[in-house]
């Protein structure tokens, strides 16, 4: 098997398997192998476009009323193209599209945020794509526990893929030859003092969230918050510790982040790494998707930190 020659030094003993070789080695069936391969190829194309594409505005709005950037639309188009060539993908739902779309008779559905935090590209910060894979004819009514696989692609100084197929979490890094090579096949999240406190404006309305953030500050937690959920949660996975929080408050009771496109896939990955994820009361993966634009508060990361959030926010 080829030794990758990435832009940075890696232990050649670890960086041996390609993304596809890894999937074969863990016995992924042909359908899921093909689907994950399509998403890996989409990731490559999106990564290349981020470096060079127009950072302008697309002149359109998504279902959340957010102005779409060229890159949002382009990333969505790339994922639709790659999935459209895959006979096993029958259903797509994208944060950038108003409804789920049936694209074939395939049994699988792929829901995705094509470029989460896309506005961060303008200030050259890391962004990511989030994918959830289900065997379903509609995303309405599914729960995160129905997910077959979840994938987070991170476009930062390097391009990486964090993946779960329900048996732990693996990380892949894009190497010089353009392929993704296994960097870690067993990511684990323990405990540690690192926090990514989103929506701090909620502290002006919620004493419970103020008290929780004061606890983290008083206990001298290291602050790691970039404004991009994918890199922020990915950092917790790779550092093996920490908590990402994004509460609701008076002006947005369910917060800002979407259950189907962002929170459920990242929660599946986090739980598979030994972490946890809640909306403050309910396990994120147990929440039923009632609408594509459904939002949810989220506290995701180390188990003890998630428990602390539930205690403070009860
Ligand atoms: P705020 C990016 O727009 C995003 O959807 C997530 O990636 C990120 O965690 C959150 O919003 C940031 O929200 O309120 O800090 O700008």
Image (cartoon, rainbow, N blue to C red):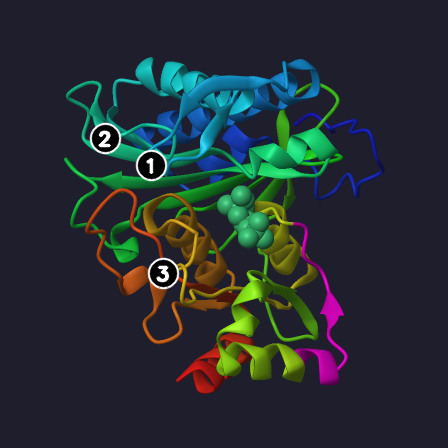
Q: Are marks 3 and 2 in contact (CB under 8 Å)?
A: no
Mark 3 vs mark 2, CA separation in Å: 22 Å
Q: Is mark 2 within 8 Å of ligand 1?
A: no
Nearer the N terminus, badge 1 or badge 3?
A: 1
| In this rendering, the label closer to the viewer, 2 or 1 | 2
Please give the residue where the numbered disc 1 appears in the rendered image: 111
User: What range is drawn magenta here?
Assistant: 216-226
Nearer the N terminus, badge 3 or badge 2?
A: 2
Q: In this view, does 285 lie above or below 278?
A: above
Q: Where is residue 188 in the image (x, y as percent from the top left)?
A: 58, 63
Dot 2: element: loop
Please give the residue where the numbered disc 3 appears in the rendered image: 254
Query: Which image quadrant is residue 124 in?
Result: top right
The answer to whether one can see residue 170 in this image is: no
Q: In this view, does 220 lie above or below 44?
A: below
Q: For the C terminus, which image quadrant?
A: bottom left
Q: Where residue 100 is drawn, which disc sits there? A: 2
* Mark 2, other Cα within 10 Å: few <14 / some 14–19 / many ≥20: some
Q: Where is residue 207 in the image (x, y as percent from the top left)?
A: 51, 82
Q: For the N terminus, which image quadrant?
A: top right
């Amino acid at each position: 098997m080829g030794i990758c020659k990435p832009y940075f030094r890696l232990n050649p003993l670890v960086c041996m398997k390609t993304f596809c070789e890894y999937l074969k080695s863990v016995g992924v069936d042909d359908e899921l192998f093909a689907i994950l391969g399509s998403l890996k190829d989409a990731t490559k194309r999106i990564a290349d476009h981020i470096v060079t594409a127009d950072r302008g505005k697309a002149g359109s709005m998504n279902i959340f009323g957010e102005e779409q950037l060229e890159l949002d639309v382009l990333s969505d188009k790339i994922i639709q193209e790659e999935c459209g060539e895959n006979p096993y993908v029958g259903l797509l739902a994208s944060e950038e599209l108003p409804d789920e779309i049936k694209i074939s008779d395939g049994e699988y559905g792929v829901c995705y945020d094509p470029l989460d935090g896309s506005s961060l590209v303008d200030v050259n910060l890391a962004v990511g794509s989030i994918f959830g894979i289900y065997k379903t004819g509609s995303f309405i009514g599914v729960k995160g526990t129905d997910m077959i696989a979840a994938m987070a692609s991170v476009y930062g100084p390097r391009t990486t893929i964090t993946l779960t197929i329900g048996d732990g979490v693996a990380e892949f890094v894009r190497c010089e030859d353009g392929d993704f090579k296994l960097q870690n096949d067993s990511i684990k999240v323990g405990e540690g003092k690192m926090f990514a406190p989103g929506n701090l404006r909620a502290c002006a309305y919620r004493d419970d969230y103020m008290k929780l953030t004061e606890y983290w500050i008083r206990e001298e937690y290291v602050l790691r918050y970039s404004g991009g959920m994918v890199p922020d949660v990915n950092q917790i996975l790779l550092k093996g510790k920490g908590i990402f929080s994004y509460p609701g408050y008076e002006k947005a009771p369910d917060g800002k982040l979407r259950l189907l496109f962002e929170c459920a896939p990242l929660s599946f990955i986090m739980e598979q790494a030994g972490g946890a994820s809640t909306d403050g009361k309910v396990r994120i993966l147990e929440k039923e998707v009632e609408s594509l634009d459904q939002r949810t508060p989220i506290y995701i990361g180390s188990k003890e930190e998630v428990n602390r959030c539930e205690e403070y926010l009860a």
